[in-house]
Amino acid sequence: MDDNMNLVNAQLVRVFNDILTIEETELKKSSFSDLSIKEMHTIEAIGMGKNKTTGEVAKELSVTVGTLTVAVNNLVKKGYVDRVRSDTDRRIVRLKLTNRGRLFFRAHQHFHKKMVEAALEDMAIDEKEALVKGLQSLHRFLKKYY
């Protein structure tokens, strides 16, 4: 690898590890210390918009519906998620964040917003566009191979 590739690789690894460490540390210190990182990402995937089906959330997280069901069962017990059956088709179950789930979601989104703002604050428009393009390429690679 050339110097730029080595530098990018080192930075990606460092940033990934830093984000995980910060999220784990902040979770433990917060009023949401009962959540695991996996549960945090499940809440993030459920989101606050449209009440998604378990299949939609499982696909977004790249897990099986069975794996998601275990996580959702725990989140329901902890008071972060509700299951809502469709009025028109009782077979369809949608996932909805509770008040506590929405509170966590907003707090976590705030962390991500601050992180992105810090990353972009000193960049020119063309640098931001190059970063977005590079991240999109990385995402395509990860989706294709993993």
Image (tube, rainbow, N blue to C red):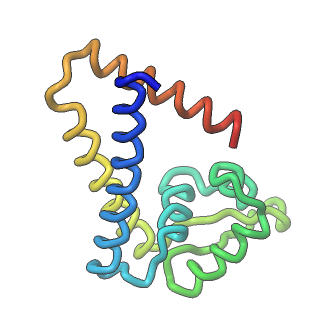
Q: Give the vertical position of 22 relative to 121 (above or below).
A: below
Image quadrant in which you'd find residue 84: bottom right
Number of marks in picture: 0
Foreground residue, 81 or 3? 3
Where residue 22 appears, as percent x and y from the top left, is: 30, 63
What residue do we see at 34% from left, 64% from top? Answer: 21
What residue do we see at 66% from left, 80% from top? Answer: 73
Image quadrant in which you'd find residue 54: bottom right
Task: List the single residue furthest toward the top.
Answer: 126
The quadrant the C terminus occupies is top right
Foreground residue, 17 or 42? 17
Task: List the single residue furthest toward the bottom.
Answer: 77
- In the image, is 114 to the left or to the right of 8? left
Where residue 135 appears, as percent x and y from the top left, is: 45, 30
What residue do we see at 53% from left, 70% from top? Answer: 39
- In the image, is 31 to the left or to the right of 100? left
Q: Give the vertical position of 136 relative to 129 (above or below).
A: below
Foreground residue, 2 or 112? 2
Image quadrant in which you'd find residue 121: top left
Where residue 30 appears, as percent x and y from the top left, is: 28, 78
